[in-house]
Image: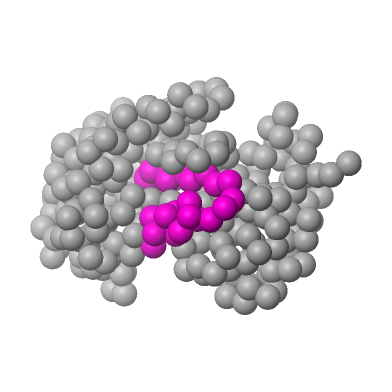
Amino acid sequence: MSKNMLAVFAASGNQGTFVANFVSEDKNLSKLYTALEAKGEKLVQADLDDPSSLELALEGVKIVLCMTATQFQGNTHEPFSLGVAYIVSSSMPHARKISNGELQIVDHFDDKAEIEQYIRSLPVKSAFFAPASFMQNVLSLFMRPVPSLANEGTYLLANCARGNTEMPFIDITEIGQWYEGKFFAGAGSIHTLDETADIASRVTCKTVRHQQWSDEIFKQCLPKNFREQLNEMWVLQWDYGCFGSQAKELVDRAKDQIRGEVIGLEEFLVNRGYKLD
């Protein structure tokens, strides 16, 4: 009896790990696929920069899930030539097109969007998942409120965006479903940054407010080698929206296609015991 084997690139990353977990733990899909190595999954070393190394890793594989945006040939051409029938790829909207050419260096988004278009041109089934901002970012330094310099007991959610900027959020542990030919804008909830600060206030019983900084001040808080790229990602959010002007419709459409409920930001933070002390 033939099996539809799934290969995940890269299974150690945020998205790849949770897709693998979803597939292995789902009561229906678990009958078809195994879990990660600790649960008996077969792990094979391969280098996406060396497509020839994929032959062993893709032996018998019919479905490939690829999350990286750099190894173009390894992710798409080689699996197809080895008989893969279905490619599931992480994608994002094209920032340069959404902004009419204003944003030139949001390469992480644009590369994924262009790879999506290439995969769609292949004679192979495909599906695409575009995740929103990870709720896990609110737990980390990337979006974690910090004590106000005024030292009056309040916390600031500070960045270069306006307080009424809407951001979609997703608990990245919930990804794992996809459908042929579809582009899923994955988000559990959409909140303005002011609303995000209010949610943090309710969950932590601290006073949290959003504060908009100038681009130049905000850039000083970003890693030096990625300042311009990360800043443009924020400009994309508050000028155009992560998923463009149809974000709410795209997110609602994706929610309608999945089984069960997806978690919202407030429930996520409560479940994690979120604190600012």
Camera-side residue: 154 or 77? 77
Query: Can I make out residue 182 in this image?
Result: yes
Q: Looking at this view, name the residue that lies furthest to the front.
A: 123
Which residue appears at 71% of the width and 51% of the height?
62
Q: Residue at x 75, y 36 (%)?
A: 30
Q: Is 171 contained in the magenta span?
A: no
Residue visible at 51% across and 61% down in the picture: 68
Q: Which residues are magenta?
A: 111-138
Percent from the top left, x then y, of residue 2?
Answer: 84, 44
Viewer-nearest residue: 220 or 2: 2
Q: Is residue 142 left or right of residue 261?
A: left
- Residue at 70% across, 74% down: 53
Q: Is residue 155 left or right of residue 212?
A: right
Q: Is residue 236 visible?
A: no
In percent of width and height, residue 15 lies at: 53, 50
Q: Quadrant of residue 264?
A: top left
**In the rendered image, which quarter contains the C terminus?**
top left
* Image coordinates for residue 233, horizontal then vertical, percent: 27, 56
